[in-house]
Image (cartoon, rainbow, N blue to C red):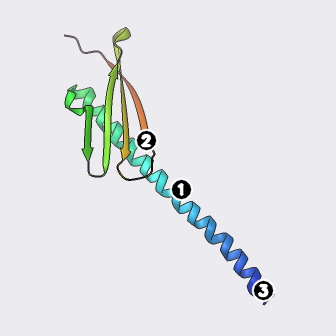
């Protein structure tokens, strides 16, 4: 009985650790997908400079894009992406782009 009790304690601790690890994997996966989405939106904005990219929804993902500054010929673009209905975890990516000559 003592061996069974020890085994139960060890397995309980291991199962708790596995559950925590699985949760972390989900968070890291969401962060990786949000980062890729932010990168994609920033790249598309760099090429097209399309104002329609300011906000968007693609499946469960949402993003917003803001543009600031035109100092030294550079424009800062900040893209924030997050999973709708998921954990409250946003990823923000800032990119410096050359200002477009008008």
Residue 24 numbered mark, or none: 1
Residue at image coords 65%, 70%: 14
Q: CA distance from mark 1 to mark 2?
A: 15 Å
**Image quadrant of residue 8?**
bottom right
Decide which of 72, 24 is in the foreground and name it. Answer: 24
Q: Secondary structure at mark 1?
A: helix
The reply to whether discs 1 and 2 touch (Cβ–Cβ < 8 Å) is no
In this figure, which residue is indicated by the disc labeled 3?
3
Q: Position of residue 57 (x, y in %)?
A: 26, 44
Mark number, residue 72: none
* First-in-chain label (1 vs 2): 1
**Rendered image quadrant of residue 46:** top left
Instruction: Give neighbour class at mark 3: few <14, some 14-19, many 20+ (Cα, 10 Å).
Output: few
Q: Tell me the SS state at disc 3.
A: helix
Residue 25 lies left or right of residue 10; in this view the side is left
Quarter that holds the C terminus:
top left
* CA distance separating discs 3 and 2: 46 Å
Q: Quadrant of the N terminus?
A: bottom right
Q: Is 81 on the left or on the right of 101, as rendered?
A: right
- The residue singled out by tag 2 in the image is 90
């Amino acid at each position: 009985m003592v061996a069974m009790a020890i085994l139960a304690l060890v397995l309980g601790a291991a199962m708790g650790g596995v559950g925590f690890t699985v949760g972390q994997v989900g968070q890291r996966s969401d962060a990786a997908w949000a980062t890729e989405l932010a990168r994609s939106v920033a790249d598309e904005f760099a090429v097209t400079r399309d104002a329609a990219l300011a906000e968007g929804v693609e499946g469960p993902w949402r993003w917003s894009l803001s543009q600031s500054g035109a100092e030294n010929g550079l424009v800062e673009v900040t893209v924030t992406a997050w999973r709708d209905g998921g954990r409250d975890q946003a990823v923000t990516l800032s990119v410096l782009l050359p200002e477009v000559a008008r």
